[in-house]
Every structure is written in C-alpha cells, then in structure tokens.
Image (cartoon, helix red, strand yellow):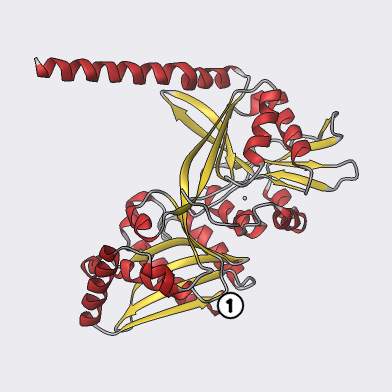
C-alpha cells in the first residue's frame, strides 16, 4: 500500500512519588489528578510540536477534550519523565480502565484517546526517546501491582515509539506483541483536482453524477465551510443534531451521549482559540442534511466525523458531501486529507494510499498479567485451532 509523504478524576488512586531511573538519571511520576494534568499544559505542547509526527492529536488541547469523554469510564494515569534539572522530557498520556476477558477482570493502561483519534503516541523531547522509553519501561516493571496489560493503539508507522518502547520493555523482561492492525487512508492534496479525479474509476464518477442529479432535483444545494472562530453556537448545534439523529446512535458515539457531548463541547471551546477546527455543512433548501467535522494542522486535514439525515438516506447526501469536500480541499495549499482509520469500502473508491497504524501490547509480571499473557500466547490459539479442527471435521462429515 502506498503511504503519504510526510492525549474521571483519579482521586481514588494516590499519586506516586518520582522514581529515579539510575541508568539515565530520569524521574518518572504517576499523575492521577486533573489538576496535575492541567498544570502540564505549558510544557506539553512544546513536546508535541517537536514530535516526529507533529499531529494535532498529540497536542494538549486534544488530550484535554478527549479526557472529557474518557473520564466517564477511566482514571488518569499520566506518566511524566523529568531530567535532573526538573525539565519535562517525556509524557506517556495514559488512562487506566477495568476490562474483562473470558471471565478475567484486569486493569489496562492505554493511551488517552477517543474514537475520533486518528493517531496517538508518547511524547518525548528530541533525542530523548530511548531514555524516556527506558524510564517508562522501568516504571512499568517496578509497579506490576498497578497494571495488568498495556495497550498502545494508533501509533503512526513512521513514529519511532513502537520499536524503541518495544525494545525497552523486552529488556525489562516483559512480553511485547506489536502488530499493524488498521490503516488511516488518505489523499494527496498537492496536485490538482482535475488530475486526481481523472485517476478515479468510471464507476465512482457515474455514481457521483447520479447522486448529484437526485439531490438537485430535490431542491437547492448549498455547501459551506466554516473555520475556527467562524464556527458559532448555531453551527455547533447543527452538528450535534445531525449526529444525534444519525445511524451511529446505537454505537454510543453520537454527540448527544454524555461522553461524546463533553468531548465536542470542550473541542468547540478550543475552536474559538485555534484555527484548526472546520465544519463542512450541506443544506438542501436551507435544511441541514449532512456535515463533517475536520481537524487541520500544518497542512494535514483529518475528517473526524461525518453525519447525515437518515430520513434522506435515499438521496445520499453523505456521499455528495464527501465528494465535494475532497474537491474543495485541492488547490488550498494543503498536503494530505486523512479519511480516518478503518476499512470502510467507500474509502477505497477514493484512494489506495494510507498510513498503517501499529498496536503495541505488553503484560505485567504480576499474576494477572501472566495469566493474560498465557491467554494470548497459548489458550486463545489453542481454542482457535480446536474450533478450526471441529469445523473441518464437520465439513468432511457433510461430504460423506
């Protein structure tokens, strides 16, 4: 596959004292209180800006908005890494959740993220990643009572974190499994719309024309893009309403649900201060029928979420909006449009380019961690093999 060029109040958990890492002279501190999270704001963004993947998803503003959602089901578990002079050289923006697998309850540490995240990562000062990874791995080894499984999702394949942290965890004697488990599909915006659209299939173009004809027969279409401070409360309410009425209601991710609503409300507040939030709105005879929320940072555009009126599904307003958004992003000095992780069929009609995303898992040396590791290494593959064997026997018996 082609690839584009190119972060609930934890008051029930005591904050750990700094723990020096002798080999590197670094101190790791566990932060579980919201006030400590807020106190990191001025130090956080310089690390995000210096990251090899300088993404808006790594900035404090995004992490703070994501926390408004995740505080519904998780506790903060931020690991900060400081040098001898007290300077912040690394942050593992983690949360801790209670999960269950085959009847076994366990504590998972994972990156602070929400379904709208397209990338996530650990922050580190330039040239400090090996030391930061070693310090974090040492803390995890020395505090097995606090966690059972570590899961880092949405690591950009060009980020050095996955390899460096895997090596550090393995050096501490922990089992690590690293795999590419999804792709963030994208479109290169540096060319022209005409050349790009010419490369698309005849079937796609024919379908787009049919959708356009249906919608134009139904009424007058208007497409609007609002950015940053242009996004007023009325526009925000339209986005909320379209989300609440969408087919995603059953998934628990619509903006009328407590967690997603708190996330969007905080993100909307930051939109009044930043210029990286955009809303594309499609109206039919002044009636809002579809909308997409986007994040734009350093020429990279991310389609966060798109919703349309389900009672007008036969008119395909979402398809039309997607087409016109892509067309409108060309010739604007932008670099890449990311459609978001996942194998949705419509994405493959628009692009064959994507960024593989890595998932990293590790297990605590404590008892539950060892049980989970055994489940991963032995029990689950054994059960899968037994299932496949029984299915094979069944099919053979049917052929007799």
| The C terminus: image quadrant | top left
The furthest residue to the right: 85
Q: In this rendering, is residue 49 above or below 110?
A: below
Seen at 50% across and 70% down, the residue is: 191
Can you see residue 229? yes
**Left or right of residue 281, residue 111 in this image:** right
Label 1: how many Cα within 10 Å (few below 14, some 14–19, many 20+): some
Please tell me which residue lies in front, 260 or 280. 280
Q: Where is residue 275 in the image (x, y as percent from the top left)?
A: 61, 72
Please tell me which residue lies in front, 286 or 145. 286
Q: Position of residue 236 (x, y in %)?
A: 47, 72
The furthest residue to the left: 400
Q: At numbered mark 1, what does the secondary structure look like: helix, strand or loop?
A: helix
Seen at 80% across and 47% down, the residue is: 88
**Left or right of residue 137, residue 306 in this image:** left
Q: Position of residue 356 (x, y in %)?
A: 51, 46
Seen at 33% across and 51% down, the residue is: 250
- Residue 64 figure quarter: bottom right
Q: In this rendering, is residue 294 above or below 366?
A: below
Q: In this rendering, is residue 10 above or below 310?
A: above
Which residue, given by chain and number where applicable, does mark 1 sit on? 229
**Left or right of residue 45, residue 392 in this image:** left
């Amino acid at each position: 596959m082609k690839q584009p060029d190119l972060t609930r109040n934890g008051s029930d958990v005591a904050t750990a004292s700094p723990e020096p890492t002798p080999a590197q002279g670094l101190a790791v501190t566990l932060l579980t209180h919201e006030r400590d999270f807020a106190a990191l704001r001025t130090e956080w963004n310089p690390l995000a800006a210096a990251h090899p993947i300088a993404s808006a998803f790594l900035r404090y503003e995004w992490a703070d908005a994501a926390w408004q959602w995740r505080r519904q089901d998780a506790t903060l578990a931020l690991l900060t890494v400081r040098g001898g002079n007290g300077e912040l050289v690394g942050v593992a923006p983690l949360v801790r959740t209670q999960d269950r697998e085959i009847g076994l309850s366990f504590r998972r540490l994972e990156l602070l993220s929400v379904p709208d995240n397209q990338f996530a990562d650990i922050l580190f000062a330039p040239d400090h990643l090996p030391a930061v990874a070693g310090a974090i791995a040492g803390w995890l080894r020395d505090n097995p009572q606090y966690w059972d499984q570590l899961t880092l999702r949405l690591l950009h394949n060009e980020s050095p974190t996955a390899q460096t942290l895997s090596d550090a965890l393995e050096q501490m004697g922990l089992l690590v499994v690293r795999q590419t488990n999804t792709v963030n599909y994208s479109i290169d915006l540096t060319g022209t719309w005409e050349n790009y659209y010419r490369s698309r299939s005849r079937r796609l173009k024919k379908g787009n024309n049919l959708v356009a004809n249906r919608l134009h027969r139904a009424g007058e279409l208007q497409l609007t893009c609002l950015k940053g401070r242009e996004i007023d409360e009325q526009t925000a309410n339209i986005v909320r309403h379209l989300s609440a009425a969408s087919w995603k209601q059953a998934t628990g991710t619509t903006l009328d649900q407590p967690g997603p609503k708190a996330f969007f409300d905080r993100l909307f507040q930051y939109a009044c201060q930043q210029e990286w939030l955009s809303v594309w709105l499609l109206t039919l005879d002044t009636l809002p029928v579809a909308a997409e929320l986007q994040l734009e940072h350093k020429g990279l555009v991310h389609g966060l979420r798109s919703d349309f009126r389900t009672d007008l599904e036969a008119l395909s307003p979402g398809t039309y909006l997607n087409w016109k958004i892509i067309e409108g992003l060309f010739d604007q000095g932008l670099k890449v449009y990311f459609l978001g992780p996942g194998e949705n069929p419509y994405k493959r009609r628009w692009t064959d380019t994507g960024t593989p995303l890595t998932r990293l898992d590790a297990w605590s040396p404590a008892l539950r961690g060892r049980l989970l590791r055994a489940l991963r290494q032995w029990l689950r593959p054994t059960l899968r093999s037994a299932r496949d064997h029984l299915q094979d026997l069944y099919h053979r018996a049917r052929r007799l």
